[in-house]
Amino acid sequence: MMFEETQRIEMRVSKILKSLSSKKYAKNNVGILSGIAGHAIFYAYASRFLNDDNCLLKSNKLLKIALNQMNKSEKLNATYSSGLCGILWAIKHLNENDFIQVEDKNFFKDGNFVIEKHALEYIMHGNIDFLHGSIGLALYLLKFDRRDFHNEFILKLYKLAIKDLKKDTITWDFYILNNELIFERVSNFGLSHGLASVLGYLLKYKKKYGDTNTLCNEMYSKIINYFLSNIQDVTEKKSFFPNWLSKTNNSYESGIRWCYGDLTIGYILLQCSLYNDYNGALKLFSLKVLKHTCNRRKIGNNFDCGFCHGAFGIFHIYKELYFCTSDNLFLDTANYWYNLSINKSNYNSSESGWLSYNTSESWHENDGLLEGNSGIGLVLIDANSETKSNWSEFFLLS
């Protein structure tokens, strides 16, 4: 399996590195998804891919800067996306994958205590967001043996839930900023900020500790029921699932991307089916959803290539799906999105080759892991790999 000649990919990765090296880092932007902790992950993997020890030295330097800046902060940011949790997750990951060696056995102890405290505080205030709230912190803590914490967390999560006894479903209040710039309660289906990430957390808990927590088991099955009870007519809405539902503001048609939509909802449901799908029905349905996404290839003019909502993220997910299923449809679809991503590169407009798009800044340089060049670099490094990527854990894909 080769999507592009290795030498060409090495050239592209080198150009991203050169672009990063020419930038001045905003030392207050230390997080994993948009800041220097995320850059550190890319540099580490680039060091192995290009056999360049200087990249690993740069990775270590960035991690030290991130930790130092976090220690200097007057107000602690504990979140996964931009705070302490993401930095520690980056260090833990690089240690587990033999990029660095954490010799102090108590290195994570104090930080984990802080993260546990904030995870419980976030959930008490109804913040169960993956990127910016309690679910992201709880997912990180699953990397340690903190069963008592998780049992307490699951209890609080259960108490917050909105339960429908007739339909045997469960969901939560999530919050979006609507067109009037007012936070609105919705039932959010997405992976980045919604129900799919809660299901992903519960699945990871079950994989680590087994089916031992009855509240976890109940929520797990009832979230799946909630998804299955909100299937849309794809001939009318184009997607099986909406982005979100509320009393006044429904977003029915979801796109193909990592953050929202059928692609990652189907991916999480497939992972659940591979864990315990006793009659095979969930696997058949999740594959139906995922295969339907393979036909959705129309993109708008403002479609970028970042991981969050862009073409390289889509490519990577289909490649991971091929490893899960050995279905050539997913391999062919991955190939389509890889070629589209490569064709959108423009080294005249950007030294790295790619620009990011958002409505406030239009087309702009973005070096982040989630939306920019560090994430694109990781996907490129892993493009021709014959195994699932370890770093997919940062996106709840492994």
Image: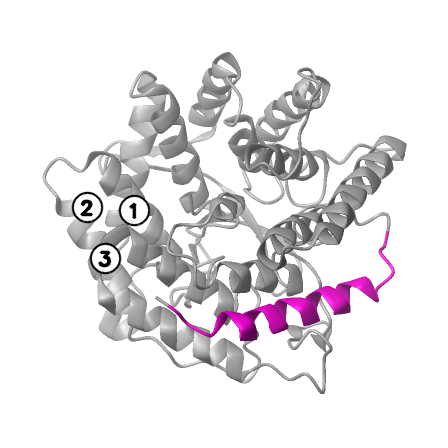
Residue at 61% of width from left, 65% of height from top?
179
Residue 330: x and y in percent read 29, 65
345 vs 79, nearest the viewer: 345
Residue 10: x and y in percent read 59, 68
CA neighbours of label 2 inside 10 A, class few (<14), some (14 to 19), many (20+): many
Relative height, residue 363 to residue 270 (above, below): below
> CA separation, marks 2 and 3?
18 Å
Residue 51: x and y in percent read 63, 55
245 vs 92, nearest the viewer: 92
> CA separation, marks 3 and 1?
17 Å
383 vs 295, nearest the viewer: 383
Relative height, residue 103 to residue 92 (above, below): above
Q: Is residue 10 magenta?
A: yes
Badge number at residue 326: 3
Report the amino acid beneath label 2. Answer: Leu
Report the amino acid beneath label 1. Answer: Leu
Q: Are marks 2 and 1 in contact (CB under 8 Å)?
A: yes
- Image colouring: one colour
The quadrant of the image that shows the C terminus is top left
> CA separation, marks 2 and 1?
7 Å
Q: Is residue 124 magenta?
A: no
Residue at 69% of width from left, 72% of height from top?
15
Residue 67: x and y in percent read 80, 35
Q: Which residue is mark 2?
A: 282
Residue 224 is drawn in which quadrant?
top left
Badge number at residue 269: 1
SS at circle 3? loop
The rendered magenta stretch, by its main secondary structure, is classed as helix
Question: Which mark is in front, 3 or 1?
Answer: 3
Q: Farthest residue to the top: give it.
A: 148
Residue at 19% of width from left, 53% of height from top?
285
